[in-house]
Amino acid sequence: MRNYDLEFLKRFSMVIGLLALVTLGLILLAKHLHDRLPAEVSPTAAKRTAERIHPAGAVYAGDTGAAAQAAAAAAAAAKASSQVAYGGTTDGAVIFQNLCGACHTGGVGGAPTWTTRTGMHASPKAPKPCTSTPSRASPARPESCRPRAATRP
């Protein structure tokens, strides 16, 4: 190779390097500008969002707005009351009578009742009350007064 060929390769390499740097700079500038632009929203997505937030996003202003707000609150209360069991009561007797009473009042299908000894309120036999107190002379206690041993399952 001759000298002028080497000189050409040096300059050509520098031009190629410079063009690569300019290309990289333009790519970074384009990315920066693209990130600053707001994202485009499709019309169908905007319509779905507007429909979803319509009940909460409505503006109530002035007397007509207050009337519309009261009507919306009444409609919401009516819808909520239709979804509450037994009129929204928290009285246990009413709930038991309406929900459980059909089976547990008459013992249908072997369901325990309130009145049977083996039913829902059956309790183990209570021990006889301790009527005698041990004295110093007779430390022995009757069977009903002795502490029971703990049983493990």
Image (cartoon, rainbow, N blue to C red):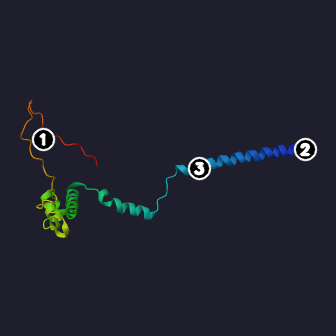
What amino acid type is highlighted by mark number 2? Tyr
Q: What residue sits right under mark 1 in the picture? A: 145
Q: What residue sits right under mark 2 in the picture? A: 4
The number of discs equals: 3
Q: CA distance from mark 2 to mark 1?
A: 122 Å
Among the two numbered marks 2 and 3 on one chain, the one whose residue lies closer to the N terminus: 2
- Label 2, residues with CA under 10 Å away: few <14, some 14-19, many ≥20: few
Q: Identify the image quadrant of residue 44.
A: bottom left
| On screen, residue 2 above or below 97 | above
Q: Nearer the viewer, residue 80 or 146?
A: 146
Judge depth for marks 2 and 3 and give the one in front: 3
In terms of secondary structure, where does tag 3 sit? helix
Q: Residue at x 42, y 61 (%)?
A: 46
Q: CA distance from mark 3 to mark 1?
A: 90 Å
Among the two numbered marks 2 and 1 on one chain, the one whose residue lies closer to the N terminus: 2
Q: CA distance from mark 2 to mark 3?
A: 41 Å
Q: What residue sits right under mark 3 in the picture? A: 31
How far from the left and from the top, in percent, is residue 8? 86, 45
What amino acid type is highlighted by mark number 3? Lys
What amino acid type is highlighted by mark number 1? Cys
Judge depth for marks 2 and 1 and give the one in front: 1
